[in-house]
Image (cartoon, rainbow, N blue to C red):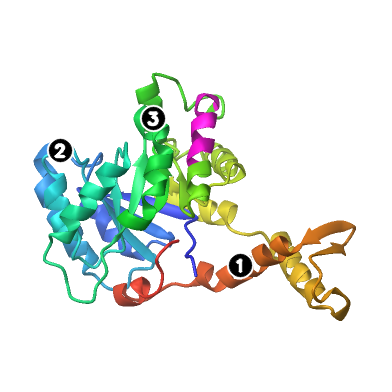
Amino acid sequence: MAISLRSVLFVPTANPKALARAPGLNADAVILDLEDAVSASEKDEARASALRALRLERWKAPLRAVRINALNTGWAEADLLAFAPAEVDVLVIPKVENAAMLQNARAIMARAALVPGRPLPALWAMVETPRGVLNLKDIAASAARTGLTTLIAGTNDLAKGLGCDGLKNDREALISHLSAIVLAARGYGLMALDGVYNAFGNEKGFAREARQGKQFGYNGKTLIHPSQIEPANVIFGPSEAVIKRAKAIIRAFKLKNNAGKGVISLDGEMVERLHLHDAQALLDSLPVLSAKPSSPASSRKGKKPS
């Protein structure tokens, strides 16, 4: 069963107060950030702090992740060797531009002092450069051999790399690229996360951009502030009307007169068996949406994102 990724919060690992709050946050996933939020002089201490935080119990977030430093830096290999055997679900790889980068990361992880019986963390790829967008098919197609499960739109760096003002006018300049990321994810069975919204004090602006991301097909949104968690959970979660409709579809297909039919009529609309499959998947996901594991061990068991 795939876990929900409605709200995925970046936590600056070099900020002791933010790191201390992380286990109690009700996001679907928390990403301990070793990259952009950490200065060069703090990299080693931030890595040690993240490892200590991962050992804490009673994390509310079903998934715990670490964003390592970019693979072309001097810190990435140490990050991969430190976290591959750690009690962490996901490693987020920034600035992914091709499948070879993920394969290289996976090879380094395999050299770590691994814990017997513990699987390697899944990989999430941040698509935040023009070359990354151009190579989306190559990146997504590597999932089976690299452990990739999710693509993340890195909108700030992507806009910078394109030389455009991609964050204005409802991200008009980035729309084609944002859609391309979703297309690649869906084509290869991956999940897709929308980029962050920088003005965390602008609730209306965040809600508008989150709804846009949902319309594009994103599973959820990456966040920079805890205040964005609940709005993201609401916007990317199923509404009561959607849940009611799913239940109605399932009931309709169970009727004796509809047994074996590929298409039925429901409330004046044609409903196919593919809609039945989607309805059942939605209802099956509801217990996961409300699950709040009480320990790292319980949060990892059987809850890898697909």
Q: Residue at x 44, y 35 (%)?
A: 199
Q: Distance between the residues labelled 3 and 2?
A: 19 Å
In the figure, is residue 1 to the left or right of 93? right
Looking at this rendering, what residue extends furthest in the top direction? 163
Q: Distance between the residues labelled 1 and 2?
A: 41 Å
Q: Are marks 1 and 2 in contact (CB under 8 Å)?
A: no
Residue beneath disc 1: 281
Q: Residue at x 11, y 51 (%)?
A: 78
Q: Of discs 3 and 1, which sits in the foreground?
A: 1
Mark linked to residue 78: none
Q: How far apart are marks 3 and 1 (CA)?
A: 33 Å
Report the predominant secondary structure element of the magenta stretch: helix
Q: Which residue is drawn at 17% across and 63% down?
A: 52
Which mark sits nearer the N-terminus, 3 or 2? Answer: 2
Tag 2: residue type? Thr
Residue beneath disc 2: 73
Q: In this view, does 111 lie above or below 128?
A: below
Tag 3: residue type? Leu
175 in the magenta segment: yes
Q: Position of residue 212 (x, y in %)?
A: 59, 39
Q: Residues within 10 Å of mark 2 (few under 14, many from 20)?
A: few
Q: Is residue 264 above or below residue 66?
A: below
Q: Is residue 146 above or below residue 299?
A: above
Residue beneath disc 3: 158
Range drawn in magenta: 172-181
Q: Position of residue 214 (x, y in %)?
A: 58, 46
Q: Position of residue 14 (x, y in %)?
A: 19, 48
